[in-house]
Image (spheres, rainbow, N blue to C red):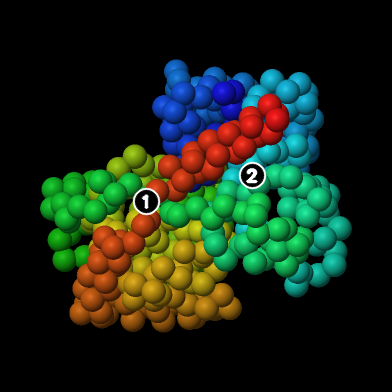
């Protein structure tokens, strides 16, 4: 069968992008042909997937989104594909991979003028066209808590939701601490053996709360800060701004920006604590990766997967309403509590070994195959 996967932009280190890549690869292994439509593709395209680039020009992000949807529409309308799967909110989808939180829910308490912007109105309209009771689009849901929020906003029937498990790499993550990888990371950044390492992972620094992490790290008592490092793994177009924040707060020599990395598990080995105070995070796969690697977690209930941290007792989960002072205090307490971190580490490992945190890609491919089978049967009935 011919499958169309639609995404605004592909780049190698994005979580959503990685999800598209892995699900597409499984679909190809199952005998399907996959065409990926995007307005931009970074990196070498795989030889097993057709890449259809639809570049657009516009002043704003929302203008680029709208222009891309216009360019995509003739391909969707031509009935060239057996199923159209969107990884961003777009009109005309058969299946929607819901990696983002419910927009209507996010804006429910914002001031009215926020809902008057062109950006909100366009994306809210497309979200409505996906989740409306009258729509037929089925939803691949990566965060179970969002189902209730979408249903509250739109009244979407239960039968259109497919809740997916997380997508960790069991073979990579469920390994013992690797002393060679630990030493390699610490040597690369000149970190002495006794220093504590706080790690934050994720591209898009504002969304991931990297400035909050830097401020919490900078607020550590001087002696503890001298014996600690903050490693920021990920990429952001404005990374220089965050380096400036660290310098302004007197921690420039203790905060290291690594850029995007392929060897992220090595950083989990080398670290003592993961800090992830995201402003918005539908899931938060890094929380589960850290737990599987035995790394304690400091995060907040904003993250969809924070509930796993609480269930496993694998770290500290702050409320959604946390303040910077709350984060500062929690980081200090975690770094001073060596016994607590060992306890959280063991709990996280046990939880990851006994819970299905690994089959999202396979379950997503199963949903796609089921959708194709049902609609093929309907077409021939």
Can residue 257 be seen here? The reply is no
Measured as percent of width and height from the top left, residue 17 is found at 51, 39
Measured as percent of width and height from the top left, residue 21 is found at 47, 34
Circle 1 residue = 358
Circle 2 residue = 96
66 in relation to 107, above or below: above
Measured as percent of width and height from the top left, residue 55 is found at 68, 25
Of label 1 and label 2, which has the lower sequence position? 2
Residue 165 in which image quadrant: bottom left
At x 25% / y 64%, what residue is drawn?
349
In the rendered view of the protein, which quadrant contains the C terminus? Answer: top right
At x 85% / y 64%, what residue is drawn?
113
Give neighbour class at mark 2: few <14, some 14-19, many 20+ (Cα, 10 Å): many
Residue 287 relative to residue 9: left or right? left
At x 37% / y 46%, what residue is drawn?
258
Q: Relative to the observer, which residue lies in front, 266 or 138? A: 138
- Labels 1 and 2 touching (C-beta < 8 A): no
At x 72% / y 58%, what residue is drawn?
156
């Amino acid at each position: 069968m011919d499958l169309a996967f639609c995404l605004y932009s592909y780049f190698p280190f994005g979580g959503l992008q990685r999800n598209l890549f892995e699900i597409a690869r499984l679909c190809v292994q199952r005998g399907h042909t996959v065409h990926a439509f995007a307005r931009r593709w970074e990196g070498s395209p795989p030889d097993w997937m057709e890449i259809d680039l639809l570049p657009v020009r516009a002043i704003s992000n929302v203008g680029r989104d709208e222009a891309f949807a216009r360019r995509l529409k003739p391909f969707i309308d031509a009935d060239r594909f057996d199923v159209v799967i969107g990884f961003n909110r777009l009109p005309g989808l058969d299946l929607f991979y819901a990696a983002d939180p419910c927009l209507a829910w996010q804006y429910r308490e914002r001031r009215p003028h926020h809902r008057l912007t062109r950006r909100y109105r366009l994306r809210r309209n497309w979200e409505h066209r996906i989740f409306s009771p009258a729509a037929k689009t089925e939803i691949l849901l990566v965060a179970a808590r969002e189902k209730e929020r979408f249903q509250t906003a739109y009244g979407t029937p239960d039968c259109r939701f497919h809740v997916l498990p997380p997508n960790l790499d069991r073979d990579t993550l469920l390994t013992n601490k690797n002393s060679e990888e630990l030493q390699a990371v610490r040597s690369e950044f000149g970190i002495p053996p006794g220093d504590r390492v706080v790690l934050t992972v994720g591209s898009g620094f504002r969304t991931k709360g990297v400035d909050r992490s830097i401020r919490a790290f900078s607020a550590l008592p001087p002696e503890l800060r001298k014996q600690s490092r903050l490693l920021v793994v990920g990429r952001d177009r404005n990374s220089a701004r965050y380096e400036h924040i660290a310098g302004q707060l007197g921690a420039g020599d203790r905060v290291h920006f690594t850029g995007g990395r392929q060897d992220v598990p090595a950083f989990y080995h080398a670290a003592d604590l993961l800090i992830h105070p995201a402003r918005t995070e539908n899931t938060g796969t890094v929380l589960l990766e850290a737990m599987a690697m035995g790394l304690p977690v400091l995060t907040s209930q904003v993250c969809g997967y924070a509930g796993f941290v609480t269930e496993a007792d694998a770290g500290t989960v702050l409320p959604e309403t946390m303040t910077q002072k709350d984060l500062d205090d929690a980081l200090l307490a975690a770094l001073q509590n060596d016994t607590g971190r060992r306890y959280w580490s063991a709990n996280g490992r046990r939880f990851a070994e006994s819970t299905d945190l690994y089959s999202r890609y396979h379950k997503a491919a199963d949903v796609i195959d089921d959708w194709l089978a049902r609609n093929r049967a309907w077409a021939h009935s």
